[in-house]
Amino acid sequence: MTDRAALIRIAKAVMADMDVGRLSDATQRSMRALDEDPEHVLHLVDVAAREGKKKRPSDRLIGGCTFLLSHGLEMLRYAVERGDAETIALVDRLRQHLIAGGETGRITPPVLLLILHQFAAAKLEIGDDLRNLMQMLMENDRDARAVVERGEAGDHFARMAEQFGGDPFAIHACLDESVEAMPEGRRAGLVMAALGDKEPAIREGAVGFLLSASAEVRERLIELLELAAPHGLLTATSLRRMIAMRNWLPPADRDGLDKAIKAVRKKAIECAPWPRASVRHVLSSGIDGSGAFTLLVIAEEAGRALLAGILIKQGFGVRDAWVRRNVTTAELREIVGQVADETGLAETDVDYVKTVCCQALAINLEAGYLPPFGLLDCAEAIGLADLNPEALTVEKLVADLIAKVDAKCLSAAAVTKTLRQSADWPEDHPTLETWFEDNVAKATGSKRAPRAKQMAKLLAGPLQARRRRWAELAGWMALSLKHRRQPGDWQGFAILARELLGTRPLEEIGLMTTIADTTLAVMDLQGRLGTRHAA
């Protein structure tokens, strides 16, 4: 358990590091240590709440706490997406903790709003009860009402545009955090206000809400886009972006957006050309056990370096995307080095980025998760025009890969050898060490049973039931390796994926026995730590 004094010390260190523009190695080590105790998020809330109640609260301490909280919430979100029952319960406790604090006045409205913004930034569901409480608290805040009545909030959008240098993607990210903290029925109002604002960058940022998770926000925005077009509120760039995102939307939204696009064109506005991109390097991480991998693209814009990042995850599609502009060589080295240390990176090509993004967009549509507006920022920064969803089943992916495998590798003897040797692949591909089954304690039976018996139960139970999922991971890994500058053993992964789609016993596939063994090792570790959050 992390004590309050330690959290305050780390929060202060974070803010000191922010002053110089980078997190020190010591601070990063402290944050990794916090990750071992997921319940520290509850204590961070308490530290920020106590500070917020003081007569002269320290904004720096609260800022440090919210930074740490954002990181902690993101770690929780990864576990929630894995279906980790204890993490899901912890997040529910956190929500109830915040509701109780808000209702009793232990957490002030400004601090609560800051915390809810961290939920939104981490893409962790806030919940309607918290949103409604936040709205009630703000309506009852006499000081906040007085500011509005005096008109001091009238230039909020102008200040935001200035703060973010007119960057519509940064503006949208800020607006989105505010929208996510609002009750469903009030979100559309803020988006409509942004689209009607006099600041062009604010209007461009509002267009990004075409990708809102709220169907009501999308519907209202599409209606207003059509009405706004004749009044010159939409630009040639707006038109290009609306067209680019059109196929990312659910089919039910597309007819309305087509009408809005047509209305813009009636204004004799020509679609703006795509920015010219100059790509220097393309890097891809390995694929981890949750089916997630990262793409990093280093490009040049107006003579300055930029770094675009895209996170793709099995079952979700494009999960996150961002662009950092005007980065220095030292910053590039630090960011790339950090990702490489965590997941491994290898040189690949832009064609691979486009292929997996199109595939991921199809997954977004199927799963009902719209991609982030930041994906369009990435597409513009690295020249990915015509980025449209293209469904690719694992069967089709594997068949396409197998068609290009050397014939000599497909003989029965060669396949048997490949499958046997696959047990050692984690030595060459460290991300395979994260390939294990989660939440399978019941399937293995008694912990006192011989390890061989537990292995057999895993192979016959959870792993057998999810062999298509493992085939998909192997297929994605094969595609990733095939596109690398130094391709590696992509053919072996393709063969393994084919066999997983077939009926070959898992005991004959070395990598699957390694996965079973890793699963048991993780369970043993979690048992010794007394928690299931070690994974």
Image (tube, rainbow, N blue to C red):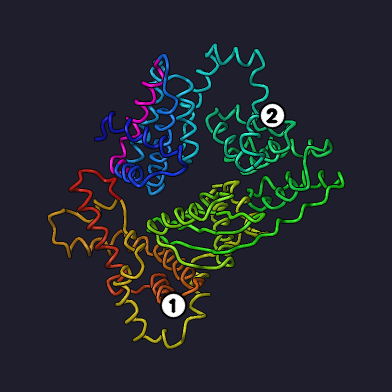
Label 1 CA crowd tier, 10 Å (few <14, some 14–19, many 20+): many
Q: For residue 97, what is the image quadrant?
A: top left
Which residue has dot 2 on it?
193
Q: Is residue 42 magenta?
A: yes
Q: Is residue 59 left or right of residue 535?
A: right
| Region in magenta | 34-54
Task: Specify the label residue 162 is tagged with.
Answer: none
SS assignment at label 2: helix
Confirm whether residue 400 shows in the render.
yes
Question: Which part of the image, by quadrant, shows the N terminus?
Answer: top left
Spot occupied by residue 421 in the image (x, y as percentages of width and height): 30, 77
Q: Is residue 143 magenta?
A: no
Label 2 CA crowd tier, 10 Å (few <14, some 14–19, many 20+): some
Spot occupied by residue 512 in the image (x, y as percentages of width and height): 31, 67
Quick check: 32 above or below 520? above
Q: Are marks 2 and 1 in contact (CB under 8 Å)?
A: no
Quick check: 404 above or below 364? below
Which residue has dot 1 on it?
491
Spot occupied by residue 472 in the image (x, y as percentages of width and height): 44, 64
**Residue pictured at 65% horizontal, 13% vertical:** 150
Identify residue type, mark 1. Gln
- Main SS of the magenta segment? helix
SS assignment at label 1: helix
Identify residue type, mark 2. Ala
Q: For residue 382, what is the image quadrant?
A: bottom right
**Residue pictured at 46% horizontal, 57% vertical:** 333
Spot occupied by residue 247 in the image (x, y as percentages of width and height): 66, 53
Q: Is residue 103 left or right of residue 384?
A: left
Q: Closer to the camera, 184 or 14?
A: 14
